[in-house]
Amino acid sequence: MISKPNPDEYSPFAAGYVNLVPDNNVIELLEQSMGSSYKLFSNLTDEQASYTYAPGKWTVKQALGHMIDTERTFAYRALVFSRNSIELPGFDQDIYVNNTDFNSQNIQDLAAEFKATRQSNLYMIKAFTAEQLLRSGIASNHLFSVRAFVYMLAGHELHHLNTFKGQYGIS
């Protein structure tokens, strides 16, 4: 079991994600939410997934694309830090979303991509040793541990699922 990271293992901004994760088994949460998120998104039509709740806000497809990008980014950081301490640049979510066309993609394909990305990340996370989980590095000018990124993966997804439920009216 991966214990919850201490507040000095992640940035104050990341606390919003880490604090969303209950104090139970984060691996089980990542596995369970992978399945439920896949089901949620794959049951949408492309029309439903093109919805945005306000002008200038992301569509469901763009938000899911952002979730995939963030899943990859956090997992990459965990991989790099698990191997050796290093400094990595920041991640500007708007640049990533604005420089791809998630809206032209099929929602079922995006849902499958999210599920495949999460499954791949789970294999990596399960292989981390206790020592690797405690290793750290600098990202976005702040110290992060590997286990912090594991919790951030789960918390970031929960954050967006809450937004989908509250702002987009889907759950």
Image (tube, grey):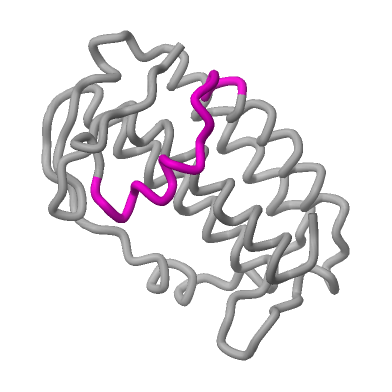
| 74 in magenta | no
Looking at the image, which residue is at 85% across and 74% down?
47
Q: Quadrant of the C terminus?
A: bottom right
Is residue 5 depicted above or below 67 in this figure? above
Q: What x and y, as percent, mark residue 138?
A: 14, 43
Left or right relative to 86: residue 36: right
Seen from the viewer's position, the closer of residues 96 and 40 is 40
How many dots with numbers? 0
Q: Please identify the dominant SS of the magenta region.
A: loop
Q: Residue at x 15, y 25 (%)?
A: 84
**In front: 52, or 112?**
52
At 47% across and 40% down in the image, what residue appears?
153
Q: Quadrant of residue 65?
A: bottom right
* 83 on left or right of 56: left
Range drawn in magenta:
11-28
- 38 above or below 130? below
Q: Is residue 54 above or below residue 107?
A: below
Q: Position of residue 123 (x, y in %)?
A: 51, 19
Q: Residue at x 60, y 68 (%)?
A: 62
Residue 81 horizontal/vertical position (percent)? 22, 30
